């Protein structure tokens, strides 16, 4: 008890210290019209000191009340703690292969003492969909996340499915300046309650780290750091910058997907450039705010120095800098703060520089990325600076060959190590309750290195590239090592669940659904030129169906879409059935292989209040196939099938039957067909919390714990 009192006292002292150390927050702005204001004053600081003093005086009494309540809260609990170790994309077949070869000793131990099963995933098996089901225990029509993107039926344009950052609705116009005086709306679009929110309502604390679709963070009894879909300071899902001293007309690739090409202007041994920030707060239409920087090159010593904000940093060739703090000035006292990394790719004959997406600064977050708000600050002060972008590993920079494989792996493992520190700290703080963390390296490396798993690559790749053939095995080994360190820190009173949201398969050929719809008379183009990003070339007066995103197809339905022509109910049902039958079993003419196994009617696979917001049809691709890159963004090309020539060579956006996830546990689980939607109700059951009737998942039986109720020590 004395240790707990001291620990509580330290926490109070840390909060006081944070008020002293954390710089004064300023009015900040992010993305397309998003921003908020924070005010700090000497009065607030004095009040904080007073409250901290009162808190210390009453600490013994509050701690006694806490202990009494704690006993009551956990009276029906079967265990003290649940630890969820999430590995995005960990594949059961690869796990079995590596376990059989003796390469995953800690996973083997779990099988001996607990269990290993395939874990059913969602339709479609995409990360935002599956992790939302993990959190809520319901199908997508109840949590409303169906893809990374959703289409706006009024504009036919894509929007992020999980959150919405709006424009400030009130502002004061002073000359050319427009000063926002109200917070812009920041909406969390996932519906249904997460299991950690329900646990919190029953007094059970949770640490939730980097679980996808947790931005903006929800308020609950616990601590949370947002994961996938948290934006950068430009409001995007991650936009890198590539700088070159070579004239743009001499650069082979002047435009990049997921990034921006910018010039470096040379003046002797000095080069100057500008970082791009968010759109200007006070001058709408002015464009992005800019931050100048300068690089000094010493070619003889092969050294370079970066000067930004009056500070100087060493740049080493093909080495990432530590996180560098930057800010963009919008006006007097108004700054937007972020962090980024620089990577000097080449020094001669031309200078080439990569700059990572500019992440939200965890010590001065422009948008809430944690709950409580100061939790991100606390982690940065305690463990060091860290990336905050939802998709931190820059897959598009590798796709566009701005980064090479070596640099990409270095970036991935740096982010992985940052997360490990946060996870083990949270694990040490979670004596009772839930500690859950999702690690992304398994997913990102499989996406980008699956091409090296096939022998056919050997003849096409040079010797240095063949060195990456073991990259996927290595990330599985690292996952095993992390698991071993977790197992060393838990006892029998803890249930350890190791799981993934889906598995992985190769992605060799892309299918353009819009081209197929066009060729089969369901979609009409204004100009038959095979172009038009975001469906801009579609003639909606003559179009009955269209595709957008990674898995879905939509009917152009009257009364729902702005220019809809398909009558709901009878005509829509008939059209869906017609398209579904034609597309199911579609073969690739090049290989005669079945490319689409089955097309699902969303009304047959979903049930819930948001079923009418789902895509009308969901395409279940066969192994080796996926929606093409152009089709995902609404472009219509000449051919239905095309080769996938990107580094992104593995995927899971296919038929869910082909890519189940994994489930390992340190306790035997009695479940013949476990599904990812079962995890939430199982965790509630383990803590003796009633499972809400709307939850569709079924709690698993853990025979070792069914008749055992662990008491407080």
Image (tube, grey):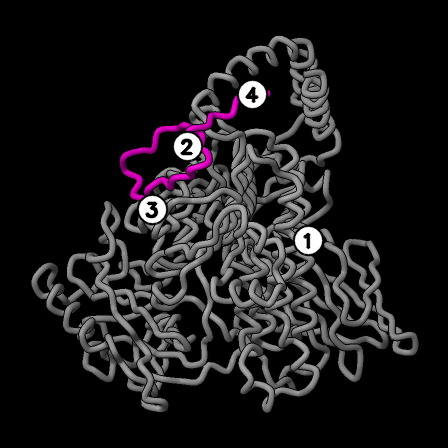
x and y percent of residue 695 in the render?
A: 31, 40
Q: Is disc 3 surrounded by few (<14), some (14 to 19) or many (20+) residues within 10 Å?
A: many
666, 553: nearer the viewer? 666
Question: Which numbered disc flags the more N-terminal residue, 1 or 2?
Answer: 1
User: Looking at the image, is mark 3 or mark 1 earlier in the sequence?
Assistant: 3
Which residue is rendered at x = 55% and y = 37% of the image?
207
What are the residue bounds of the magenta stretch? 686-713
Q: Nearer the viewer, mark 1 or mark 2?
A: 2
Hey, which quadrant is residue 391 in on the image? bottom right
Q: Quadrant of residue 54?
A: top right
- In what element is the residue under mark 2? helix
Earlier residue among tags 2 and 3: 3
Dot in front, 1 or 4: 4
Mark 4 is surrounded, within 10 Å at the Cα level, by few (under 14), some (14 to 19) or many (20 or more) other residues, namely few
Residue highlighted by disc 3:
143
The outermost residue toward the right is 300
């Amino acid at each position: 008890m004395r240790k707990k009192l001291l620990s509580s006292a330290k926490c109070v002292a840390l909060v006081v210290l944070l008020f002293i150390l954390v710089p004064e927050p300023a009015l900040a702005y992010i993305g397309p019209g998003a921003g908020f204001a924070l005010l700090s004053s000497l009065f607030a600081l004095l009040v904080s000191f007073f409250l901290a003093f009162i808190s210390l005086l009453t600490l013994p009494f509050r701690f006694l009340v806490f202990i009494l309540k704690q006993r009551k809260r956990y009276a029906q609990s079967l265990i003290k703690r649940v630890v969820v170790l999430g590995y995005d994309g960990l594949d059961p077949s690869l796990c079995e292969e590596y376990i059989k070869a003796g390469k995953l000793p800690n996973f083997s131990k779990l099988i001996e003492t607990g269990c290993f099963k395939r874990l059913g995933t969602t339709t479609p098996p995409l990360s935002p969909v599956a992790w939302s089901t993990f959190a809520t225990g319901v199908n997508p029509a109840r949590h409303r996340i169906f893809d990374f993107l959703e289409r706006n039926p009024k504009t036919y344009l894509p929007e992020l499915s999980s959150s919405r950052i709006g424009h400030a609705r009130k502002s004061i116009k002073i000359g050319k300046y427009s000063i926002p005086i109200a917070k812009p709306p920041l909406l969390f679009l996932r519906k249904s309650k997460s299991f950690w929110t329900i646990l919190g309502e029953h007094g059970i604390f949770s640490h939730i780290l980097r679980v996808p679709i947790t931005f903006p963070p929800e308020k609950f009894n616990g601590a949370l750091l947002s994961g996938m879909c948290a934006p950068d300071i430009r409001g995007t899902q991650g936009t890198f910058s590539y700088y070159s001293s070579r004239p743009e007309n001499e650069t082979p690739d002047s435009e990049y997907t997921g990034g921006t090409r910018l010039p470096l202007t040379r003046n002797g041994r000095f080069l100057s450039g500008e970082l791009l920030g968010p759109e200007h707060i006070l001058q709408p239409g002015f464009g992005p705010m800019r931050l100048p920087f300068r690089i000094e090159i010493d070619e003889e010593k092969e050294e370079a120095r970066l000067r930004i904000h009056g500070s100087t940093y060493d740049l080493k060739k093909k080495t990432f800098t530590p996180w560098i703090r930057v800010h963009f000035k919008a006006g007097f006292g108004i700054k937007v703060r972020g962090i980024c990394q620089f990577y000097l790719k080449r020094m001669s004959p031309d200078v080439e520089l990569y700059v990572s997406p500019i992440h939200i600064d965890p010590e001065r977050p422009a948008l809430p990325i944690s709950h409580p708000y100061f939790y991100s600050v606390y982690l940065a002060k305690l463990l060091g600076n860290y990336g905050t972008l939802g998709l931190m590993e820059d897959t598009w920079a590798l796709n566009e060959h701005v980064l090479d494989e070596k640099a990409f792996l270095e970036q991935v493992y740096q982010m992985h190590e940052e997360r490990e520190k946060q996870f083990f700290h949270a694990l040490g703080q979670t004596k009772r309750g839930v500690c859950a963390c999702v690690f992304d390296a398994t997913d990102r490396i499989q996406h980008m290195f699956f091409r090296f798993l096939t022998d056919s690559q050997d003849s096409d790749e040079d010797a240095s590239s063949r060195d990456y053939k073991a990259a996927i095995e290595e990330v599985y080994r690292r996952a095993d090592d992390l698991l071993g360190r977790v197992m060393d820190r838990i006892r029998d009173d803890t249930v350890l669940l190791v799981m993934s949201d889906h598995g992985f398969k190769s992605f060799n050929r892309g299918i353009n659904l819009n081209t197929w719809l066009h060729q089969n008379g369901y979609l009409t183009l204004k100009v038959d030129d095979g172009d038009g990003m975001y469906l801009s070339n579609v003639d909606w007066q003559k179009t009955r169906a269209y595709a957008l995103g990674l898995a879905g197809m939509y009917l152009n339905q009257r009364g729902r879409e702005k220019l809809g022509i398909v009558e709901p109910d009878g005509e829509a049902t008939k059209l869906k059935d017609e398209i579904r039958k034609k597309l199911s079993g579609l073969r690739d003419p090049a290989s005669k292989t079945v490319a689409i196994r089955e097309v699902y009617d969303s009304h047959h696979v979903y049930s819930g209040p948001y079923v009418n917001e789902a895509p009308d049809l969901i395409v279940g691709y066969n192994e080796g196939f996926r929606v093409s890159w152009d089709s995902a963004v609404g472009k219509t090309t000449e051919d239905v099938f095309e080769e996938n020539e990107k580094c992104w060579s593995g995927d899971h956006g296919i038929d869910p039957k082909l890519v189940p996830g994994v489930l390992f546990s340190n306790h035997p689980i009695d479940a013949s067909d476990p599904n990812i939607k079962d995890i939430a109700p199982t965790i509630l059951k383990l803590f003796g919390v009633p499972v809400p009737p709307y939850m569709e998942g079924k709690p698993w039986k853990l025979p070792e714990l069914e008749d055992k109720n662990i008491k407080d020590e």
